[in-house]
Image (cartoon, rainbow, N blue to C red):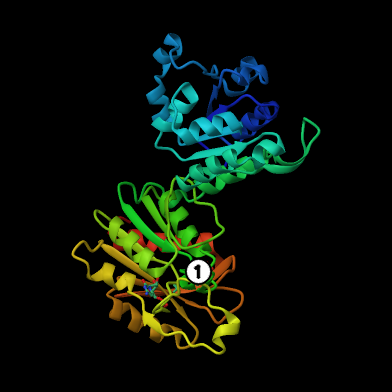
Amino acid sequence: MTLAGKHIVLGISGGIAAYKTPFLVRQLVQNGAEVETVLTRSAAEFVTPTTLAALTGRPPRSALFDIEAEAAMGHIELARWADTLVIAPATAHTIGRLAAGLADDLLTTLALATPAPLFLAPAMNQQMWAHVAVQENIRALRARGVGIIGPDAGEQACGDVGPGRMSEPETIIDHLQTLHAQKPLEGKLTGRKIVITAGPTREPIDPVRYISNHSSGKQGYAMAAAARAAGAEVVLISGPTRLETPAGVRRVDVESATDMMKATQAELEQTDVFIGVAAVADYRPAEPKDRKIKRESSGDISIEMTMNPDIIRSVAESAARPTVVVGFAAETNDAIQHARDKRLRKGLDLIVVNDVSRKDIGFNTDENAATLISDDKEVTLSKQSKDSLAGAIVEAIVELLGES
Ligand code: PMT
């Protein structure tokens, strides 16, 4: 019963994959969730309201202006009731309406009106999925924090082969379970704004070359997901990564340390917690060239480097200093001593030190191990997934905020 008591609104749009939704509903209910179904106009062509009503014990809803349904639970009430809104299948048309922010039926209105995380399980012909219009809409939705599940690749109902099949109900349930897994922290950061930097920065040498590092962004994105799961409003200032934005998180994309600094300062007002997970380049080429440096004309070259701003230090020294400032320390030797010094030098409340000389943790791995150093405590956390480490760090932050 991993979703016990969770209120799930399942939106169904009109595609052949809607035949899978009764199985999804059944598994949600078996996992203890309370489910309300909302159909677009064409969804009822593919799955019957009678089946859904039998499985959920509640009549499915469809129309925005249905007096009887509104009397039972108004659509804004339904938007507030939801712990999660999942749209499966999400057709190209529904994805387009969501990306445009339309509210022309009950489902799209709910998507705008609910504070709950939104997940989409796209399903469509592979050529449609590959279309630039659909991909741009998906990118825009991801950047707004919408979770995209799948689609899977394989043989399609139309006979084509490729990506576009709706993910299996088990996969969708897995995503929801992960979202709702961090129960002890649930609501602990509600009303708090948390700004997190993640990933590498890229410092241009010329229009085609840059200096960067091995950060994948995984630890920073895991922090963002954990803070969001604890109820915070999360802004993720991200260097270039290949990762999906965690559901419900607002992402600001940057390239260089200078961009990251500007984006951080723009977000600082009213921020309760700042977490610097990004591997910010300490130096950048002093004078990036406007044109590509040519091998034949240059021979050996040297690049003069100039110091980048220290973002986290400027946050800690700012007049708008967040209540809690957390840094990460990437160390290769004498890790604890270097991290203790770094915490004091940068004016941080907490520093999370990880040993980046190890191949199995730190940069570009799925697992990490760290020591958390604050004013009065040093706690060592053994190797575990970056998600679970992020949960432990959020717990420490909750404690520092005095909210435990
Ligand atoms: O992204 P992954 O592949 O998941 O890898 C995770 C990680 C190894 C990058 C992460 O766990 C980590 O250690 N991040 C900090 C990397 C780093 O730049 O450490 P540092 O010791 O050089 O910097 C200390 C702190 O100052 C960090 O919070 C950093 O964000 C901040 N900093 C550093 C330089 C700078 N110019 N401005 C900063 O704000």
Q: Quadrant of residue 401?
A: bottom left
Q: Is residue 310 above or below residue 42?
A: below
Q: Is residue 333 above or below residue 11?
A: below
Left or right of residue 282: residue 19: right
Quadrant showing the C terminus? bottom left
- State the residue in front, 122 or 360: 122
Disc 1 crowd, CA 10 A, few/some/many (<14, 14-19, 20+): few
- State the residue in front, 79 or 30: 79
Determine the residue positioned at 44% across, 32% down.
101
Quadrant showing the N terminus? top right
Find disc 1 in the rendering and name its residue. 207
Q: Position of residue 78 (x, y in %)?
A: 42, 25
Does the rendering let one see residue 399?
Answer: no
Q: Is residue 112 above or below residue 366?
A: above
- State the residue in front, 299 or 92: 299
The secondary element bearing badge 1 is classed as loop
Q: Quadrant of residue 316?
A: bottom left
Q: Position of residue 352 (x, y in %)?
A: 42, 72
Determine the residue positioned at 61% across, 74% down.
360
* Quarter of the image where ligand 1 sits: bottom left
- State the residue in front, 380 or 130: 130
Q: Quadrant of residue 197?
A: bottom left
Left or right of residue 362: residue 190: left
Does the rendering let one see residue 359?
Answer: yes
Determine the residue positioned at 34% across, 66% down.
261
Q: Is residue 28 above or below residue 147?
A: above
Determine the residue positioned at 66% across, 42% down.
130
